Image: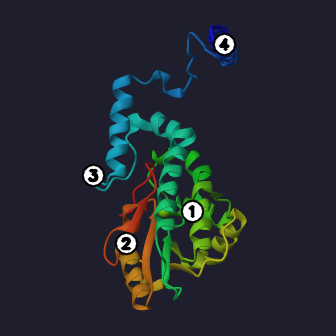
Protein backbone atom coordinates (compact mmCIF):
# COMPACT_ATOMS: atom_id res chain seq x y z
CA UNK A 1 0.00 0.00 0.00
CA UNK A 2 2.83 2.33 0.96
CA UNK A 3 4.65 1.42 -2.24
CA UNK A 4 1.51 2.17 -4.28
CA UNK A 5 1.06 5.59 -2.62
CA UNK A 6 4.74 6.43 -3.24
CA UNK A 7 4.45 5.43 -6.91
CA UNK A 8 1.35 7.58 -7.41
CA UNK A 9 3.09 10.56 -5.76
CA UNK A 10 6.06 10.17 -8.11
CA UNK A 11 3.76 10.04 -11.14
CA UNK A 12 1.98 13.24 -10.09
CA UNK A 13 5.29 15.06 -9.61
CA UNK A 14 6.45 13.92 -13.07
CA UNK A 15 3.19 15.06 -14.69
CA UNK A 16 3.46 18.46 -13.01
CA UNK A 17 7.00 18.98 -14.26
CA UNK A 18 6.21 17.78 -17.76
CA UNK A 19 3.16 20.12 -17.86
CA UNK A 20 5.28 23.05 -16.70
CA UNK A 21 7.91 22.16 -19.29
CA UNK A 22 5.39 22.08 -22.12
CA UNK A 23 3.94 25.45 -20.96
CA UNK A 24 7.44 26.92 -20.94
CA UNK A 25 8.02 25.54 -24.39
CA UNK A 26 4.80 27.09 -25.67
CA UNK A 27 5.64 30.43 -24.07
CA UNK A 28 9.05 30.32 -25.70
CA UNK A 29 7.36 29.93 -29.05
CA UNK A 30 5.29 33.07 -28.58
CA UNK A 31 6.82 36.44 -29.42
CA UNK A 32 7.29 38.44 -26.26
CA UNK A 33 8.77 41.79 -27.20
CA UNK A 34 10.14 43.87 -24.36
CA UNK A 35 9.63 47.04 -26.34
CA UNK A 36 6.54 47.45 -28.47
CA UNK A 37 7.17 49.48 -31.58
CA UNK A 38 4.12 51.19 -32.96
CA UNK A 39 4.01 51.75 -36.70
CA UNK A 40 4.79 55.27 -37.80
CA UNK A 41 1.75 57.18 -38.92
CA UNK A 42 1.19 60.59 -40.35
CA UNK A 43 -0.34 61.45 -37.00
CA UNK A 44 3.10 61.63 -35.45
CA UNK A 45 3.15 65.35 -36.09
CA UNK A 46 -0.20 65.90 -34.44
CA UNK A 47 -0.26 66.71 -30.80
CA UNK A 48 -2.15 64.37 -28.52
CA UNK A 49 -4.57 67.17 -27.76
CA UNK A 50 -5.31 67.84 -31.44
CA UNK A 51 -5.84 64.13 -32.07
CA UNK A 52 -8.35 64.06 -29.22
CA UNK A 53 -10.09 67.19 -30.55
CA UNK A 54 -10.42 65.63 -34.02
CA UNK A 55 -11.70 62.38 -32.52
CA UNK A 56 -14.22 64.43 -30.58
CA UNK A 57 -15.31 66.17 -33.79
CA UNK A 58 -15.69 62.83 -35.58
CA UNK A 59 -17.78 61.38 -32.74
CA UNK A 60 -20.01 64.47 -32.88
CA UNK A 61 -20.47 63.86 -36.62
CA UNK A 62 -21.40 60.23 -36.12
CA UNK A 63 -23.80 60.97 -33.29
CA UNK A 64 -25.51 63.69 -35.35
CA UNK A 65 -24.70 66.43 -32.86
CA UNK A 66 -23.18 68.89 -35.31
CA UNK A 67 -24.94 71.59 -37.23
CA UNK A 68 -24.87 71.16 -41.00
CA UNK A 69 -21.23 71.38 -42.07
CA UNK A 70 -19.58 71.74 -45.47
CA UNK A 71 -15.98 70.67 -44.97
CA UNK A 72 -13.92 68.89 -42.36
CA UNK A 73 -11.92 71.16 -40.01
CA UNK A 74 -8.63 72.16 -41.67
CA UNK A 75 -6.60 71.08 -38.64
CA UNK A 76 -8.15 67.58 -38.81
CA UNK A 77 -7.14 66.92 -42.43
CA UNK A 78 -4.35 64.48 -41.53
CA UNK A 79 -6.49 62.86 -38.88
CA UNK A 80 -9.39 62.16 -41.27
CA UNK A 81 -7.03 60.94 -43.98
CA UNK A 82 -5.44 58.53 -41.51
CA UNK A 83 -8.83 57.36 -40.26
CA UNK A 84 -10.23 56.75 -43.74
CA UNK A 85 -7.07 55.16 -45.18
CA UNK A 86 -6.12 53.09 -42.17
CA UNK A 87 -7.85 50.23 -40.41
CA UNK A 88 -10.10 52.26 -38.11
CA UNK A 89 -12.71 53.09 -40.77
CA UNK A 90 -12.97 49.45 -41.83
CA UNK A 91 -13.24 48.30 -38.22
CA UNK A 92 -16.10 50.75 -37.68
CA UNK A 93 -17.90 49.57 -40.82
CA UNK A 94 -17.40 45.92 -39.87
CA UNK A 95 -18.88 46.56 -36.40
CA UNK A 96 -22.03 48.10 -37.87
CA UNK A 97 -22.36 45.31 -40.43
CA UNK A 98 -21.95 42.66 -37.76
CA UNK A 99 -24.61 44.21 -35.51
CA UNK A 100 -27.00 44.53 -38.45
CA UNK A 101 -26.46 40.87 -39.33
CA UNK A 102 -27.16 39.82 -35.73
CA UNK A 103 -30.37 41.88 -35.80
CA UNK A 104 -31.47 40.54 -39.19
CA UNK A 105 -30.89 36.94 -38.14
CA UNK A 106 -32.84 37.43 -34.90
CA UNK A 107 -36.09 38.22 -36.73
CA UNK A 108 -38.82 35.97 -37.93
CA UNK A 109 -39.90 37.25 -41.31
CA UNK A 110 -43.46 37.16 -42.59
CA UNK A 111 -44.21 34.52 -45.21
CA UNK A 112 -45.61 37.10 -47.64
CA UNK A 113 -42.19 38.32 -48.84
CA UNK A 114 -42.91 41.93 -47.83
CA UNK A 115 -40.12 42.49 -45.31
CA UNK A 116 -37.67 45.01 -46.66
CA UNK A 117 -34.11 46.09 -46.01
CA UNK A 118 -33.16 49.45 -47.53
CA UNK A 119 -29.62 50.31 -48.52
CA UNK A 120 -28.20 53.66 -49.49
CA UNK A 121 -25.49 53.39 -52.17
CA UNK A 122 -22.61 55.91 -51.86
CA UNK A 123 -20.38 55.21 -48.84
CA UNK A 124 -22.84 52.45 -47.89
CA UNK A 125 -22.63 49.78 -50.61
CA UNK A 126 -20.05 51.51 -52.79
CA UNK A 127 -17.00 53.44 -51.69
CA UNK A 128 -15.91 56.64 -53.41
CA UNK A 129 -12.64 56.76 -51.48
CA UNK A 130 -10.55 56.94 -54.69
CA UNK A 131 -12.38 60.18 -55.52
CA UNK A 132 -12.18 61.62 -52.02
CA UNK A 133 -8.50 60.76 -51.66
CA UNK A 134 -7.93 63.10 -54.63
CA UNK A 135 -10.06 65.78 -52.98
CA UNK A 136 -8.68 66.01 -49.47
CA UNK A 137 -11.01 63.50 -47.79
CA UNK A 138 -13.64 66.18 -47.29
CA UNK A 139 -11.30 69.15 -47.01
CA UNK A 140 -12.57 70.57 -50.31
CA UNK A 141 -16.11 71.91 -50.64
CA UNK A 142 -18.20 69.27 -52.44
CA UNK A 143 -18.22 69.85 -56.19
CA UNK A 144 -21.18 68.03 -57.76
CA UNK A 145 -19.84 68.46 -61.33
CA UNK A 146 -16.53 66.81 -60.54
CA UNK A 147 -18.21 64.14 -58.44
CA UNK A 148 -20.66 63.31 -61.26
CA UNK A 149 -17.69 62.85 -63.61
CA UNK A 150 -16.32 60.29 -61.16
CA UNK A 151 -19.71 58.55 -60.81
CA UNK A 152 -20.11 58.02 -64.56
CA UNK A 153 -16.75 56.27 -64.66
CA UNK A 154 -18.43 53.52 -62.61
CA UNK A 155 -15.26 52.85 -60.65
CA UNK A 156 -16.62 53.07 -57.10
CA UNK A 157 -15.36 50.10 -55.08
CA UNK A 158 -17.16 47.54 -52.98
CA UNK A 159 -17.50 47.97 -49.22
CA UNK A 160 -16.84 44.38 -48.21
CA UNK A 161 -18.60 44.51 -44.84
CA UNK A 162 -21.73 45.90 -46.54
CA UNK A 163 -21.62 43.19 -49.20
CA UNK A 164 -21.56 40.66 -46.36
CA UNK A 165 -24.71 42.21 -44.83
CA UNK A 166 -26.35 42.53 -48.25
CA UNK A 167 -25.81 38.83 -49.00
CA UNK A 168 -26.99 37.83 -45.54
CA UNK A 169 -30.29 39.75 -45.67
CA UNK A 170 -30.85 38.54 -49.22
CA UNK A 171 -30.30 34.94 -48.11
CA UNK A 172 -32.64 35.45 -45.14
CA UNK A 173 -35.43 36.43 -47.53
CA UNK A 174 -35.60 40.21 -47.20
CA UNK A 175 -36.63 42.26 -50.22
CA UNK A 176 -33.75 44.59 -50.96
CA UNK A 177 -34.49 48.16 -51.98
CA UNK A 178 -31.70 50.52 -52.95
CA UNK A 179 -32.56 54.15 -52.26
CA UNK A 180 -30.02 56.68 -53.45
CA UNK A 181 -29.67 60.41 -53.95
CA UNK A 182 -28.05 59.74 -57.33
CA UNK A 183 -30.21 61.04 -60.17
CA UNK A 184 -32.14 58.88 -62.62
CA UNK A 185 -29.70 59.62 -65.46
CA UNK A 186 -27.06 57.66 -63.49
CA UNK A 187 -29.19 54.50 -63.41
CA UNK A 188 -27.26 52.46 -65.99
CA UNK A 189 -23.81 53.30 -64.70
CA UNK A 190 -24.96 52.70 -61.13
CA UNK A 191 -26.38 49.27 -62.00
CA UNK A 192 -23.15 48.30 -63.79
CA UNK A 193 -21.01 49.58 -60.94
CA UNK A 194 -23.07 47.68 -58.35
CA UNK A 195 -22.90 44.43 -60.32
CA UNK A 196 -19.16 44.79 -60.90
CA UNK A 197 -18.75 45.33 -57.16
CA UNK A 198 -20.58 42.06 -56.42
CA UNK A 199 -24.16 43.15 -55.66
CA UNK A 200 -27.00 41.37 -57.35
CA UNK A 201 -30.70 40.51 -57.15
CA UNK A 202 -32.06 43.69 -55.58
CA UNK A 203 -35.80 44.23 -55.94
CA UNK A 204 -35.95 47.98 -56.57
CA UNK A 205 -33.43 50.71 -57.32
CA UNK A 206 -34.90 54.12 -56.54
CA UNK A 207 -33.04 57.20 -57.78
CA UNK A 208 -33.95 60.89 -57.79
CA UNK A 209 -36.36 61.62 -60.61
CA UNK A 210 -37.06 65.03 -62.14
CA UNK A 211 -39.76 65.70 -59.51
CA UNK A 212 -37.29 65.02 -56.71
CA UNK A 213 -34.70 67.60 -57.73
CA UNK A 214 -34.27 70.34 -55.16
CA UNK A 215 -35.60 68.27 -52.29
CA UNK A 216 -33.36 67.63 -49.32
CA UNK A 217 -32.19 64.05 -48.94
CA UNK A 218 -34.22 63.62 -45.78
CA UNK A 219 -37.37 64.82 -47.55
CA UNK A 220 -36.77 62.75 -50.70
CA UNK A 221 -35.96 59.55 -48.83
CA UNK A 222 -38.87 59.96 -46.37
CA UNK A 223 -41.28 60.32 -49.30
CA UNK A 224 -39.92 57.23 -51.02
CA UNK A 225 -40.11 55.18 -47.82
CA UNK A 226 -43.72 56.31 -47.41
CA UNK A 227 -44.48 55.04 -50.93
CA UNK A 228 -42.75 51.74 -50.14
CA UNK A 229 -44.93 51.29 -47.04
CA UNK A 230 -48.05 52.23 -48.99
CA UNK A 231 -47.22 49.38 -51.38
CA UNK A 232 -47.58 47.05 -48.41
CA UNK A 233 -43.92 46.53 -47.52
CA UNK A 234 -42.59 46.53 -43.94
CA UNK A 235 -39.28 48.37 -43.63
CA UNK A 236 -37.39 46.28 -41.12
CA UNK A 237 -33.84 47.55 -41.62
CA UNK A 238 -32.13 50.54 -43.20
CA UNK A 239 -28.41 51.09 -43.74
CA UNK A 240 -26.89 54.45 -44.65
CA UNK A 241 -23.84 56.61 -44.05
CA UNK A 242 -25.89 59.83 -43.60
CA UNK A 243 -28.43 60.57 -40.92
CA UNK A 244 -30.62 61.88 -43.76
CA UNK A 245 -30.73 58.29 -45.09
CA UNK A 246 -32.24 57.10 -41.83
CA UNK A 247 -34.25 59.90 -40.21
CA UNK A 248 -37.41 61.77 -41.19
CA UNK A 249 -40.68 59.90 -41.51
CA UNK A 250 -41.66 56.32 -42.38
CA UNK A 251 -38.42 55.17 -40.81
CA UNK A 252 -37.27 51.56 -40.53
CA UNK A 253 -37.84 49.42 -37.42
CA UNK A 254 -34.09 49.69 -36.95
CA UNK A 255 -31.53 51.85 -38.71
CA UNK A 256 -27.79 51.37 -38.99
CA UNK A 257 -25.48 54.37 -39.41
CA UNK A 258 -22.24 53.68 -41.22
CA UNK A 259 -19.27 55.88 -40.46
CA UNK A 260 -18.55 58.81 -42.78
CA UNK A 261 -16.66 61.84 -41.48
CA UNK A 262 -15.91 63.20 -44.98
CA UNK A 263 -19.15 64.93 -45.91
CA UNK A 264 -22.59 65.84 -44.68
CA UNK A 265 -25.81 65.61 -46.71
CA UNK A 266 -28.85 67.26 -45.07
MG1 LIG B 1 -24.48 57.65 -48.87
Q: Where is residue 140 in the image (x, y as percent from the top left)?
A: 46, 48
Q: Quadrant of residue 152?
A: bottom right
Instruction: Assess whether mark 3 and mark 1 are in contact (beta carbons under 8 angstroms).
Output: no
Q: Earlier in the sequence, mark 1 or mark 3?
A: 3
Query: From mark 2 to mark 4, how far is it between C-alphas?
Result: 70 Å
Front label number (3 vs 2): 2
Q: Mark 3 points at which residue?
A: 65
Q: Please tell me how crowded label 2 is: few (under 14), some (14-19), or many (20+) other residues with Cα within 10 Å.
A: few
Q: Earlier in the sequence, mark 1 or mark 4?
A: 4
Q: Name the residue under label 4.
A: 4
Front label number (3 vs 4): 4
Query: From mark 3 to mark 4, how far is it between C-alphas?
Result: 75 Å
Residue 253 tag number: 2
Q: Position of residue 138 (x, y in %)?
A: 46, 48
Q: Position of residue 207 (x, y in %)?
A: 52, 78
Secondary structure beneath disc 4? Answer: helix
Residue at 56% x, 11% y is: 35
Amino acid sequence: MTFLTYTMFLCLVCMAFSCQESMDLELDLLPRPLIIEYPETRLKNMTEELTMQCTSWRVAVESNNLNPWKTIPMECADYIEEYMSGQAYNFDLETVSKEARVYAKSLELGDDGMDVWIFDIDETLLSNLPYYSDHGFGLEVFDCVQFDRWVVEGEATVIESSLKLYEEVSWLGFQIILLTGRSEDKRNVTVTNLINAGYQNWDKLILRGDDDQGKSAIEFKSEKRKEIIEEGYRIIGNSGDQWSDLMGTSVASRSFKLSNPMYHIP
